[in-house]
Amino acid sequence: MRFNLDLDDSDTPDSSSRRTPTPKENVQWIPLQKHPVFTSAENVGAAAAEDPLPRNLLAWDGASRLYYWDSSKQYLHRVSIRLGEPEPTSVLAASPSKVLVADVKIGFVVNKISINRNGSALVLAGSDGICVMYLYGRSSARDNTITCRTVSIGSQIYFDESNVIRTLQVSWHPCSETHLGVLSSDSVFRIFNLSADVLQPEQEYYLQPLQPGRSRKAASLCPVDFSFGGDHLWDRFAVFVCYSDGSIYILCPIVPFGSVYKWDSVLEIYNDANTLGLESTNPTAVSNSSRAVSWLEATFPELSSEAGDRENISAVKAQAHALFDTSLCLQGPLQRIQRNRANEDFAVSTGVSEGRAIGFLYNLVSKDSVLVTAWTGGQLQIDALADEIQPLWTLGSAPRLRVNPQDHQVLGLAMICESIAHHLPVVKLDEPLDQTVWLGHPPPLLRLAIVDLSLPQKRESGYHILMFADPLLPERIYCLHEGGVDSIVLHFLPFTNQSSGKDETVRAPSVHPVLSTCQVDNTRSVSPLCGFVALSDSFGYSWIVGTTSTQECIVLEMKTWDLLLPLQVATDYYAKDEERKDMNNAPDIISKELLAGPKVVPVPQVSPNLRSVAADCIEGRSMLHQYFKLFHENYVEYAHKVYFELEHHGPQMKRIIDDQLARLSEAQEKLVRVKDKQAGLDYRIKHAIHQHHTLEQRLKDLRNLPGVHKKPMSRADRKFKSELDQLTGVELDALHSSIETLKARQRRHTTQSSKDVISNQRRKIPGRSHALDAQMSQLKSSLAKLSLINSENAKKVKVVESSLRAQGSGK
């Protein structure tokens, strides 16, 4: 029996007060795809359908509530759902649904909504704003709406008129209900604590993947996406950052202040650091592990308590702490290796995907950490961590701390995270454990597969791909793109297969089209999806729900791996198969017993004395009577059976003959039609042959052109062309953003310097003029450096634009 409680709203934030059954009211349960929210779309803008940015306007709280953001009316729908009622495969929705309205105006286009883990708050994210809506507000019985408190996140940082910083990705932390992670275009990762301050971040990490002057590619400096780690060893304290050139970096450890973790998980990595790190003979391993142990003991004080006090602990809360003399190291870029099947070893591999990276997904499958990178060329690059993540700090780089002056508690921190990849050797998988563990080596990536989705009608800017992990089957990944939804199932996982004792060969992932939004005769997407969510219940049933730009809802049940492929019904084949079954099941016209003939009964043996007996004597009559009786029992009865069956099967024979005559007439009609079409086929064949000759002649003419005999591009030419392709849309944006940022900084410095000069003139004291002159000279030199940097950036922009124009004219 299944139990689903529809929950009522309450003004208090207490979970016990708001998890109350809904009062008796006129609620009708209907299929989700037929709900009035999705079937009564009015005035849906065409701009929403043609919006090039990927959107996901659906969210599920993991229990019984589905949320949908209405872009045209600027409010949120809350739909109560029942999974598996009345049928195990059905999804019902309550009508009417609740409408949640923000208490402030949402002044930007929402591209993504996401709900925190306890279902109390929902983030509305767009390129021009971030808002958090608290889902329990003031109810209005008049219009069935709920007014919810809504706050703007980081409005002074991201959406100020004096800067051009854009938000790239927004995500809730999996171990906290109040912490929100934001990655922005200025290469800074911030964590906001909504319970403390929504304007100022709690933690700031300034990412510097490469040292200045070590790279010529701006693509390696532009982040595109990030993801929090899963519930596995140090992964739960890690943040993965993906850049536009496909490189992946790791920040570890990062813990929101006040987040809750399982005690057994924290104790496991604590014992691991003490056992494998502090007892190592390598001084580097001892230093790194001791720093990790001190960080764990300060962040989770329960680890320093007595053993008897730990018995009843099930979860621990992270305390605000930071090491005062070190900053986190940006581990990476992670090197990708792949198996060489010729000699069964591993070799470093290079990326072969087209375009630039646009999306990233971290998915924990049993013991494997799977990283999926989406590219604008329509490919997915699937890798797995070949080693465990370990924390790593950079010595001599002290962070900036914001401390409470009363109790000296850390309220916030900011640090610069630099990469030290040029100091680290390449990690090999066949090295012993004592030569790799706790030595500060970033874990390598094992290449599992590169999946080409074969998307239709590639645009100049590339494809937009969103990825989601299946909550019921972690080996399955859903890809949302312009063509619909695809399902990717991973069949080979290195650590999981090894721990389960499976000695299987490497199998490529299987790709199954689940939903297509393209017409058969047109590759253009008719109604692209703007919302997607995967549902599951405790009984093992799974569904996917999608919404289109025209506000239509699609619900599909997802079964086992064998049932992922869409059904393709061939009506002609099944019709013929049914006919064959009818013919096989038809009764025999004449039974086998009759076809075998009458039974041969042997004539009774007669003595030689009776062979010459006369027929009119008593012995002769007796013998004739016996012979007549045998004839009657066998041949006469057999003749009666034959007559009866022939008379009984007469209608059946007539039906069979009529059927054969009908088929004969149908075959004759088909032959007549074939003869009629023969002339047209002959004409088409002649026309095709003529067209073939014409194309051959054109091909010969084209081969005689002077430009055809150019030499093919060398490896250096191809490399330079790939670099120019990566420059498109990346270098110019990065340089323009840098120029705008430097101009904003120059304006702020100029304003601040003028204010300082005026204030110093007001309180000028004799004897300190030389200090003021030194400050003025320092400010002038700073302004001169800034102007020099601006001029150099302007020259770089001109060089890049001229290269792009030359490339376009060459094509």
Image: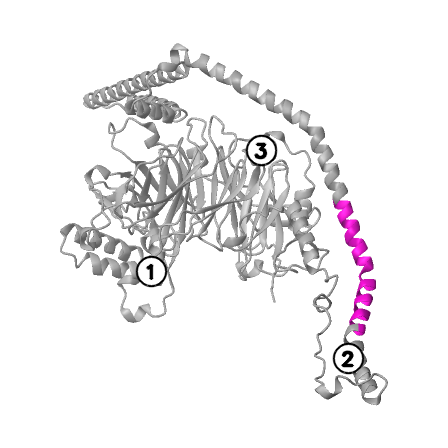
Front tag of 2 and 1: 2
Q: In the image, is residue 643 part of the stretch drawn in magenta?
A: yes
* Disc 1 packing (10 Å; few <14; some 14–19; many ≥20): few
Q: Position of residue 725 (x, y in %)?
A: 38, 25
Point 48% across, 40% down: residue: 466
Q: Nearer the viewer, residue 638 or 699?
A: 638
Looking at the image, do the residues carrying marks 2 and 3 touch, with CB atoms under 8 Å apart?
A: no
Mark 2 or 1, nearer chain start: 1
Q: Determine whether, in the image, residue 334 is placed left or right of residue 375.
A: left
- Please report the bounds of the magenta region as a residue range: 636-663
Quote the CA–CA distance across marks 1 and 3: 44 Å
Q: Which residue position is annotated with label 2?
A: 630
Q: Which mark is residue 499?
A: 1
The amino acid at mark 3 is: Ser
Q: Position of residue 346 (x, y in %)?
A: 26, 45
Q: Which mark is residue 791?
A: none
The residue tagged with tag 1: helix, strand or loop? helix
